[in-house]
Image (cartoon, rainbow, N blue to C red):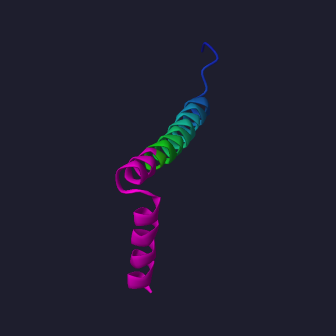
Amino acid sequence: MCGYDGRMSITVVLSALALVAVLALVAAIFIGGAVYVGRVRRRGTAAVLDGARKHRELRD
């Protein structure tokens, strides 16, 4: 039977899904960082912090 086990394919699929999830998380962190850096460069640190403060006050 060539050593094939049906459970092995589930393990491979779960491992692949875990790898994809980790890679997506890392990509999201880098994209978020790039967006933040772009915003800071365009508007300046003080404006970004003021905007975050206003957003937090509106949420509360």
Figure label count: 0
Where's residue 9, x and y in %?
Answer: 55, 30
- The furthest residue to the left: 42
Where's residue 42, x and y in %?
Answer: 35, 51
State the residue at coordinates (42%, 53%): 40
State the residue at coordinates (40%, 48%): 41
In the rendered image, the vertical position of residue 21 relative to residue 39, given as above or below: above
Give the magenta range: 34-60
Using residue 20 as the reference point, say whether residue 48 is left or right of it: left
Q: Give the position of the C terminus as an image quadrant.
A: bottom left
The answer to whether residue 50 is magenta is: yes
Q: Give the position of the N terminus as an image quadrant.
A: top right
State the residue at coordinates (53%, 42%): 26
Which residue is more in the foreground, 2 or 23? 23
Q: Examine the residues drawn in magenta and state their main secondary structure.
A: helix
The answer to whether residue 45 is magenta is: yes
- The furthest residue to the right: 3
Q: Quadrant of residue 48?
A: bottom left
In the rendered image, the vertical position of residue 52 relative to residue 3, given as above or below: below
Which residue is more in the foreground, 24 or 60? 60
Using residue 3 as the reference point, say whether residue 38 is left or right of it: left
Using residue 19 as the reference point, say whether residue 54 is left or right of it: left
Which residue is more in the foreground, 32 or 3? 32
